[in-house]
Amino acid sequence: MWRRSTSLPLFFSHLQQVRRADELKICQAFCTEIVKPPVEGESNSRRNSPFVAFVLGGPGSGKGTQCLKIAETFGFDHIGAGDLLRKEMHSDSENGAMIQKLMKEGSIAPSEVTVKLIKKAIESAENRKFLIDGFPRSEENRVAYERIIGAEPNFVLFFDCPEEVMVKRVLNRNEGRVDDNEHTVKERLKVYKAITLPVANHYAKKGKLYKVDGTGTQEEIFERVRPIFASLRLST
Ligand SMILES: Nc1ncnc2c1ncn2[C@@H]1O[C@H](COP(=O)(O)OP(=O)(O)OP(=O)(O)O)[C@@H](O)[C@H]1O
Ligand SMILES: O=c1ccn([C@@H]2O[C@H](COP(=O)(O)O)[C@@H](O)[C@H]2O)c(=O)[nH]1
Ligand SMILES: [Mg+2]
């Protein structure tokens, strides 16, 4: 069974430790849902619900790169929403052509498609700790996830990175992605600012957003991320 294993005062002392890394801004302490230990008589579905961190940031902000490091170091399963959609796009699925068109345009896929793929990935995993990378992209995505999965994320990790750095990284990526070109990255940035940033703001208002400076080397960034996950003390 998965459960949090730390008490409230201990948890806040971890938060103080985390705050010492000044790149990190915790808008408020976590909400009660994350810190509340399971209570006698509480339903099994709630106690067994997975631990989920959404990972947000602009295109090329380093979400995927850092998720790999977090997953390896802290034993999370990494679910890349874009990766799931790319897999779907390359399969014989009826949605393949639609996904390819949206990706080329830098637009967002319908929530029902993405959430269904995420739900399947969560349900088919043995792990109960997940990083959901690059999702939710919109308020509509967020509402659909919370309705279909029946829970909010435990927290949201957000990589803050200047546009010129992100664009440079994307254009140097060289992985054959249909969206790694100058035109699409500009469209993605517009979508990100208009539609995705409000999602990050929503979670900031709820005290669930961890904002990390996404500039510097991959290792430097990971050292900013590390204390956040080290402070969680989740049992497996
Ligand atoms: N700190 C860094 N310094 C230089 N290059 C980096 C850094 N972090 C990641 N990269 C490289 O930049 C590119 C984009 O990184 P990554 O794929 O992790 O970003 P992302 O946020 O997942 O982007 P997208 O939203 O487009 O999937 C990759 O080629 C990656 O190797
Ligand atoms: O929730 C999501 C995630 C991704 N997309 C589409 O995929 C591309 C690439 O996503 P990455 O997370 O950067 O790999 C994105 O621009 C969208 O077109 C999506 O629609 N919904
Ligand atoms: Mg990525």
Image: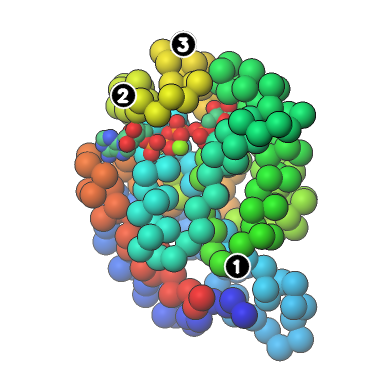
- Please, what secondary structure does the residue beneath circle 2 have? loop
Q: In this view, does 194 lie above or below 198?
A: above
Q: Distance between the residues labelled 2 and 3?
A: 14 Å
For mark 1, does the 10 Å Cα neighbourhood hold few (<14), some (14 to 19), or many (20 or more) residues?
Answer: few
Given the image, on which type of amino acid does mark 2 rest? Asn
Q: Mark 3 points at which residue?
A: 183
Going from N to C along the chain, the mark reached first, 2 or 1, is 1
Name the foreground residue: 215 vs 73: 73
Rendered residue at 37%/48% (across/down): 66
Badge 1 element? loop
Residue under the image location 39 percent in, 51 percent down: 68
For residue 172, the mark is: 2
Are there few (<14), some (14-19), or many (20+) residues within 10 Å of tag 2? few
Q: Position of residue 86 (x, y in %)?
A: 58, 33
Q: Residues within 10 Å of mark 3 (few under 14, many from 20)?
A: few
Q: Identify the residue shown where x is 68% and y is 27%.
A: 96
| Residue at the limit of the structure toward the top, as seen here | 183
Looking at the rendered structure, which numbered label has been put on residue 106? none
Instruction: Name which residue type carries label 3.
Output: His
Instruction: Residue 218 in the image: state x and y as whole percent.
Output: 26, 44
Q: What element carries label 3?
A: helix
Q: Where is residue 11 in the image (x, y as percent from the top left)?
A: 44, 75
**Residue displayed at 54% across by 39% down:** 83
Q: Nearer the viewer, residue 22 or 232?
A: 232
**Would the CB of label 1 be found within 8 Å of ligand 2?**
no
Q: Is residue 220 left or right of residue 46?
A: left
Task: Evaluate if marks 2 and 1 touch, with contact meaning CB atoms under 8 Å apart.
Answer: no
Q: Earlier in the sequence, mark 2 or mark 3?
A: 2
- Between the residue at mark 2 and the residue at mark 1, the CA separation in whole angstroms equals 35 Å
Which residue is denoted by mark 1 in the rendering? 126
From the viewer's perspective, is 182 left or right of 84? Answer: left
